Image (cartoon, grey):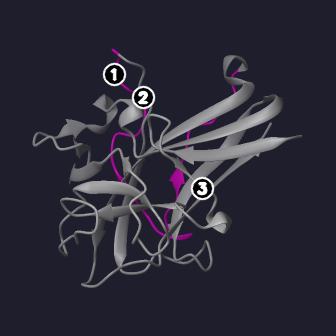
Amino acid sequence: MATTITWAGGGGSPTIQPAASGGFNTCGFFGSSFGFSIRVGEYNQSTFRTNEAGTSDGGTLPNLRYANTSGAYVGGLSTPDELRNIEQYEATLRIRLDTDAPVGTQNSSFRAFDKVNINNNPSGVAIFAAEILKDPGTYGSGDISWTQIYGSGSILSLDDHILAWQTGVQHDWYIGLTATPTSIGEKTDIGFYFETEFL
């Protein structure tokens, strides 16, 4: 079965390239703008598509900044919103699975690691994630709280697409991400990993 997985911002752009391709192949968390640092104990004020070293600006990704266990500051807003009130296009990432025949999915998950081994923790940073599930004009059914994700110790479980109406050739997952450094200095030993099973 022909299968393609693409990563992009929640609204579908910009596209994040596969890790092996180089170029703009990851998302980077920054302070007030690209290249600005985040203080220890504070969270990202901006999120960008960037290279592995975090030195190239590939365009902004939707920014969610941790406000409390169940809320985030969306974009540049100063009033937090509940995670279930956040629109899918406001999610940091959209992961899309395309197949040439209808499938269902189960046991889908997302994790952060050190770019060496998917079971290792990311280095020098705490990453929090939440699945965003919300149709316009409705109250969402995604995660009600952030989950800190690290290696095999804590993985974000994603929605199963196993009902008849969910079986298809295209599947999307929307993930909100926010980060805070745990020590001073540049942090580049951070990678993200997605996996799913077909039905």
**In the image, which disc is placed on residue 141?**
2
**In the image, which disc is placed on residue 139?**
1
Residue drawn at (50%, 53%) of the image: 156
Separation of marks 1 and 3 at Cα, in angstroms: 32 Å
Q: Which residues are magenta?
A: 137-163
Q: In this orientation, which residue lies closer to the viewer: 24 or 111?
A: 24
Q: Secondary structure at mark 3?
A: loop
Measuring from the top left, give residue 5's x and y in whole percent: 68, 46
- In this view, which residue lies farthest toward the right? 1
Q: Quadrant of residue 4?
A: top right
Instruction: Decide if residue 68 is in sight here.
Output: no
- In this view, which residue lies farthest toward the left? 78
Instruction: Decide if residue 118 is in sight here.
Output: yes
6 lies left or right of 32: right
Asked if the residue at tag 1 contacts the one at tag 2, i.e. Cβ–Cβ closer than 8 Å, the answer is yes
Q: Is residue 84 above or below residue 55?
A: above
Q: Residues within 10 Å of mark 2 (few under 14, many from 20)?
A: some
Measuring from the top left, give residue 121's x and y in whole percent: 49, 76
Asked if the residue at tag 2 contacts the one at tag 3, i.e. Cβ–Cβ closer than 8 Å, the answer is no
Q: In this orientation, which residue lies closer to the viewer: 37 or 151?
A: 37
